[in-house]
Amino acid sequence: MRRRNLLTLAAAGTVAGCAKPGAGTAENLAPDAPDPAGSSSPAGPAFPEGFGWGAATSAYQIEGAANEDGRGPSVWDVFCHEPGRIRNGDTGDVAADHYHRYVSDLDLMQDLGLTSYRFSVSWSRVLPTGRGAVNAKGMDFYQRLVDGLHERGIAPVVTLFHWDTPQALQELGGWENRDCAKWFADYAHTMFTALGDRVPTWLTLNEPKTVVDVGYTAGTHAPGKRDRNLANVVGHHLLLGHGLAVQALRGTTGKSRIGAALSLSPAYPADDSAAAAHQTAIADGEENRRWLDPVLRGHYPQDWLDTQPADAPVRAAIKDGDLAVIGTQSDVLGVNYYGTTHVTSTGGRIMVHPTSQATWQEIDPNGLYDLLTRIKRDYGDIPLSITENGMATTNPLRDEDRIAFLRDHLAAAHRSIQAGVKLESYHLWSLMDNFEWAEGYTQRWGIVNVDFASQRRTHKSSADWYKTVIARNAV
Ligand code: IFM
């Protein structure tokens, strides 16, 4: 089942980088790269000098140590422990035990040659009830992690919210409560103060769309609600939290950059009919513009608003001045890209391209080129970072399918740079196998295999391949 295949229902109303700035420009593309890694295959055209080669993870998916050192529970801790929520009853209690193994994980990143690492902070590890006194031990973990990255020459890209709302705040309504945007900005300010310029790039929200579509509409992610009206209110409050967090950073003397990480999917008509074209425009509004427009232009797209009935609660949730806050200028946009969307004349979705172990994924590298060049065309030259891109595969170690995926997507990213897109960095998802939400440990997204019984890490073929790519700065 497609995790994100909810737009038709929603539209019908039937569902209650941190790379150095200036890196990715066509002007500074280097000539064809030499092959320092000694790979037998010739290197393709080189990426710009200083291009950020990264990998991404998130707190709940890898850290474990759920009940240690004063960490408070998040909605995901509660959700996972409810019977029937997660495949095989898996939880993130231990996950990849990164909280205890972060030093060897940092060494692993250094060995790969990463120059950028995207991770998220567990809000309830730092602020156990989401507000109030800082948990010093929790904060210390992120201090040590950031220090360890700098010692290894890896730039931290830090996401503030990757879905793990503190449970104490959820009991006050979580993101359904407008106050959550303010609580989030206060937490963000705490992090800016603690880590300051040692974090060159902050990301406010990861994929608010997934929270709306999966956490609040399908109900298969925490907090497990099925209410499209409520979901859209949550979406607005998430965006408000983003804007307030950007403003909180502007209120510091720091020089870090900030933006959101949005999951985006180019929508194409499944046939040549006018009806399919019309439905595709609606789908594009839901998948892309309802997130891009507020963040980068300070307004919701009118055609998306028009899909909301006159009495839709989201209309009342949007207060005067909110869009100006949400549209506070970002420095960077994080792009999570997993695939394309094909829309039929009745607004349904069909798969035109191959999928992966994650059957919601429609693999189409050209979609990445279309997406990146479209952002430049429609939203201007904001620096872009690919903050997630990857595939799940059942191949445990010899993951040639993942190598082909990464190669083709990196080639598309390179073409976009040649077309003038200001792409600064690429973070594959994911550094290592981890807790894949409702799928538990059954889906393997890492380039490093994790044996969850022993916590042993082993390079997959894709890790060795990526190491070579990074060494020669070329695919
Ligand atoms: O694992 C997730 C990640 O947390 C957010 N983006 C998609 C990934 C794969 O489903």
Image: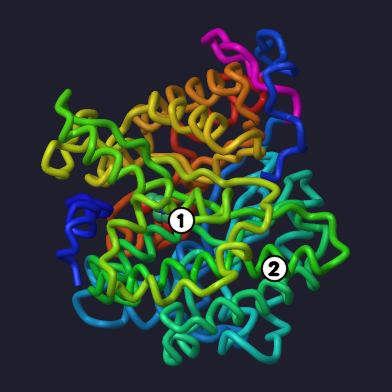
Q: Left or right: where does residue 162 sit relative to residue 394?
A: right
- Image quarter where the C terminus lies is top right
Q: Left or right: where does residue 374 sit relative to residue 442?
A: right
Q: Name the mark on residue 23.
A: none
**In the rendered image, which residue does mark 1 sit on?**
300
Residue with the most extreme left position: 346
**In the rendered image, which residue does mark 2 sit on?**
142
Magenta residue span: 37-50
The local secondary structure at tag 1 comes to loop
Q: Position of residue 468 (x, y in %)?
A: 59, 24
Q: Residue at x 18, y 34 (%)?
A: 276
The answer to which of 170 and 395 lies nearer the viewer is 170
**Which amino acid is tagged 2?**
Tyr
Q: Are the two marked residues, 1 and 2, in contact with CB atoms closer than 8 angstroms?
A: no
Q: Residue at x 46, y 56 (%)?
A: 300
Measure the alpha-carbon separation of dots 1 and 2: 35 Å
Residue 1 shows in the view: yes
The local secondary structure at tag 2 comes to helix
Whichever of labels 1 and 2 marks the residue nearer the N terminus, that label is 2
Crowding around mark 2 (Cα neighbors within 10 Å: few <14, some 14 to 19, many 20+) is: many
For the stretch drawn in magenta, what is the main secondary structure?
loop
The type of colouring in the image is rainbow
